[in-house]
Amino acid sequence: MEKSLLIAGFGGQGIMLIGKMLGFAASKAGMNATFYPSYGAEQRGGTANCTVIIGDDEIGSPVSRRLDTLIAMNEPSFVRFVDRMKKGGVVIVNSSLVQSKVEDKDVKAFYIPANDLAQELGSVQVANIIVLGAYIAATGILDAEFAKQVIAEQLGRKPEMLELNMQAFDKGMAAVK
Amino acid sequence: MSKEFIKGNEAIAEAAVRAGCRFFAGYPITPQNDIPEYLSKRLFEVGGNFIQGESEVASVNMVFGVAATGIRSMTSSSGPGLALKAEGISNLAGARVPSVVVNVARGGPAIGTILTAQQDYLSATKAPAPGGFKCFVLAPATVQEAADLVYEAFDIADKYRTPVYVLADGMTGNMMEVVELPPMRELSELPSKDDWRVNKLEQDGNFRSISSYSPTAEGLQEMNEASEAMYQQWDKEEQRWEAFMMDDAEYVVTGYGSSGRIAKSAVKELRAQGIKAGLIRPITLVPFPKDAFDQIDYGRIKEIFVAEMSIPAQYADDVRWATKSKLEIISVLTSGGVILETEAIVDAVKERV
């Protein structure tokens, strides 16, 4: 098994953070993982993206033209990457900010209003953790317990923020039906 | 052993510390900045020293000075910085000072781009600087291999009294991967350097010197002949490469470093499509693993696909030499920060099937 995921959105939406967190979670689950950030002349308000590959075996290229999963946190990212999906691929769409729909019948789409759900919890900043939960629920790529351990390690400095992030993760998982 | 999910540059830095590196001097340049950043804190935790020099020239010469006392020392940079360190590296080689030089390569020519590329192959392997010498050159393809090779680089440097040049690239430096880091070496276990280090007096009480300079022509020729004997020993004993699916291969793909790992993905994909592809991935660039190419069945294989993130192609020249021009070379190239895609290699091979 080897699955490619591209996470894309505005700079500041916590794209890189959830990409890295998935790598940490995969490592805890005993799998291999690569995280490759698009770095360089990225601007605030521009698009940021990273590729995460998770697999049982040695991972070759850390980037992939064809994607198993796409997390599109904003409209420009959706438009730019949605045509790269493999047959049977999964797109997690932040429908709070993306109006477009997935037209390819061979691709499964989950429309998660991540910003709105985050606002309900009291902070739009946890929208990324909501889609992280949605991604785990939609793909079943690894046990949610490993992701929660990573949340506790990475985001656990302030108890109230940890609680909020855990709620966000659960809410994201529950949003996938 | 526990595994960690860690960034390439940090794995390189931590592996150096665990290998016994206790001195680093460097000057900032992307995409290698995490190496000095990490070491600026970490080296002091283990009783080492870190200096951000006023320039590349100063930094590499500080490494010369400290390494000449027998302390395991390293510098790192990227293409434009390596150009400025060139004369210092020449000195390290000429004076036979064991040291480790890391290049996290970026796109060129000149300042080029901060993005990943492989445009320093020729400068790393043929002529890092004027004067005619070689560094031992290692080319990691993954973060694990970067950690392992940097760790080993210090042993190779000590064994031969040579600078070891680790040619990584921005992809390996900036990606994160699951890695098992090597164990911490005790400094007391490291090989003694009492027979040459400058901070020990000769038995007659005289000071020692260590230099790439000789006052006589014959003396310099002797030094160069000794280096040449070392290069020949590397050729005989130190060639290293990964061969994958070569036994029945009809199409050979080759690449080093990040292109090597991408090429391996391409070979797996081609095999999944029923095409008999194989991979040769050099791990040492100096010595060049020409034995790997001697083992090719030239009756069965007619062409070789060279994957490289460099335009013009550089590594391809050595492939042509190692295959004695018996194969048609088909280059699959990107440059300037454009990442080579698995699919581009797969497509190039399929066009010929």
Image (cartoon, rainbow, N blue to C red):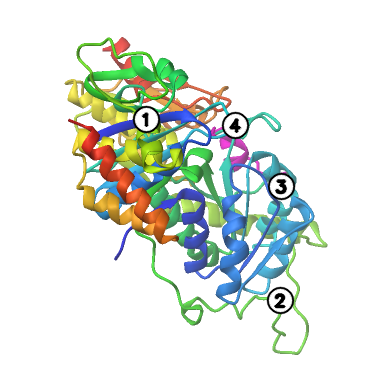
Mark 2 = which residue?
A: B198
Spatial CA span between label 2 and label 1: 53 Å
Percent of width and height locating residue B153: 50, 59
Q: Nearer the viewer, mark 2 or mark 1?
A: 1
Mark 3 = which residue?
A: B86
Q: Residue at x 61, y 81 (%)?
A: B194
Percent of width and height locating residue B91: 72, 56
Mark 1 = which residue?
A: A6
The disc placed on residue A42 is none
Percent of width and height locating residue B348: 36, 15
Amino acid at pointer 3: Ala
Q: Nearer the viewer, mark 2 or mark 4?
A: 4
Q: Residue at x 78, y 62 (%)?
A: B214
Q: Do badges 2 and 4 share one subunit?
A: no
Amino acid at pointer 1: Leu
Q: Do badges 3 and 1 share one subunit?
A: no
Residue at disc 3, secondary structure: helix
Q: Is residue B124 magenta?
A: yes
- Pointer 3 chain: B
Spatial CA span between label 2 and label 4: 52 Å
- Pointer 1 chain: A
Give the mark nearer the N terminus: 3 vs 2. Answer: 3
Spatial CA span between label 3 and label 1: 39 Å
Res B58 visible: yes
Name the quadrant containing residue B124.
top right
Residue at disc 4, secondary structure: loop
Spatial CA span between label 4 and label 1: 19 Å
Q: Nearer the viewer, mark 4 or mark 1?
A: 4
